[in-house]
Image: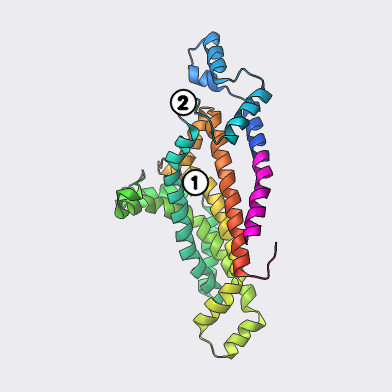
């Protein structure tokens, strides 16, 4: 297991290097000038040139890249062009809202979707199964921002059950945290419930047709034991894989939900950085997200080995 972890971490180094080069070149070659945005609409050409020189944007691109890589190797993500604050500190301040939303969404989606998928496979062809499949289609069809505004209209404006916007840290108390995170979590989890339920149903259907399941039934085991201990355990690998990929996509896909519910997370930070052409923040966030994706893929590989010891890498 230790060998697997070390080999995956070593393999991630060139991947992160390619990501760093790609992100740097993409931002430098794209249109827009952060110096002009920082100077304002009434700034003169001399003022903009002075700001570009101060930010180091007047230097050749290879020289800028070498300087940036040197900072990265020292653990420095640079400073924001607009606020002058360290990028690592700005990302750190936004991690809690984003991770809170991502984790509550993932947990809620798993708790709801996996039992739904198991029951849909068990009741294959029934009205319950057809209802779950219809719900899955709806989950994939409704855009997140549309569902978000519907949730706000019904549960905040009409029923007055939850706040429409904002975020409360768990340090402010669990009730306040849950009250603020409930609507964004349900909104964002809708599509993941549809995805996880469909994959769980498909994986369970394949396993339920195997001979050892029929043998378990012939032994007189209870249906619950057959479904959970024998069928779900052997169907777990594709389910774990989709959950891992879903979590990776979830972290990068919270931008719309954070915008709809005015949550001050990393998604909002990226939107503001893109609008202000704040290169260091965009570069830093993408590199951090890439590192998170590497760790999630590593966790998926470890879960594979733990669920099925026959798997070798």
- Seen in the picture, residue 210 relative to 156 is either above or below; the reply is below
Q: Which mark is residue 84?
A: 2
> In the figure, residue 312 lies in which quadrant?
bottom right
Reply yes or no: does residue 281 show up in magenta: no
Q: Which sits in the foreground, 262 or 99?
A: 99
Give me the residue at 55% from left, 10% from top: 45
Question: Which stretch is magenta?
Answer: 1-17
Reply yes or no: does residue 12 show up in magenta: yes
Q: Which mark is residue 159?
A: none
* Residue 81 rendering spot, x and y as whole percentages: 50, 25
Q: Which sits in the foreground, 203 or 27?
A: 27
* Residue 271 rendering spot, x and y as whole percentages: 50, 35
* Residue 268 rendering spot, x and y as whole percentages: 46, 38
Q: Which residue is mark 1?
A: 254
Q: CA distance from mark 1 to mark 2?
A: 26 Å
Q: Residues within 10 Å of mark 2 (few under 14, many from 20)?
A: few
Q: Residues within 10 Å of mark 1 (few under 14, many from 20)?
A: many
**N-terminal label among 1 and 2:** 2
Q: Quadrant of the N terminus?
A: bottom right
Q: Main secondary structure of the magenta part?
A: helix
């Amino acid at each position: 297991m230790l060998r697997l972890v070390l080999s995956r971490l070593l393999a991630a180094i060139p991947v992160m290097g390619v990501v760093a080069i790609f992100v740097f070149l993409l931002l430098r070659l794209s249109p827009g000038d952060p110096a002009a945005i920082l100077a304002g609409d009434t700034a003169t050409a001399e003022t903009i040139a002075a700001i570009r020189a101060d930010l180091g944007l007047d230097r050749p691109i290879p020289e800028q890249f070498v300087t940036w890589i040197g900072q990265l190797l020292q653990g420095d993500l640079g400073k924001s062009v607009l606020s002058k604050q360290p990028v690592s500190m700005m990302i750190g301040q936004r991690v809690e809202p984003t991770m809170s939303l991502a984790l509550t969404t993932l947990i809620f989606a798993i708790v709801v979707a996996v039992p739904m998928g198991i029951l849909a496979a068990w009741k294959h062809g029934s009205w319950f199964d057809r209802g779950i499949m219809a719900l899955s289609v709806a989950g994939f069809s409704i855009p997140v921002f549309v569902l978000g505004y519907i949730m706000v209209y019904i549960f905040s404006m009409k029923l007055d059950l939850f706040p429409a916007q904002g975020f409360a840290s768990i340090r402010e108390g669990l009730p306040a945290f849950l009250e603020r995170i409930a609507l964004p979590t349900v909104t964002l989890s809708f599509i993941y419930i549809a995805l996880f339920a469909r994959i769980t149903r498909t994986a369970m259907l394949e396993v339920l047709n195997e001979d050892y399941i029929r043998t378990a039934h012939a032994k007189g085991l209870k249906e619950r034991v057959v479904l959970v201990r024998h069928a779900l355990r052997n169907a777990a690998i594709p389910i774990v894989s989709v959950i891992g990929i879903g979590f990776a996509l979830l972290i990068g896909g919270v931008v719309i939900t954070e915008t709809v519910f005015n949550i001050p997370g990393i998604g909002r930070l990226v939107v503001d950085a893109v609008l202000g052409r704040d290169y260091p923040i965009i570069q830093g966030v993408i590199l951090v997200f890439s590192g998170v994706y590497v760790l999630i893929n590593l966790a998926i590989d470890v879960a594979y080995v733990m669920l099925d010891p026959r798997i070798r890498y």
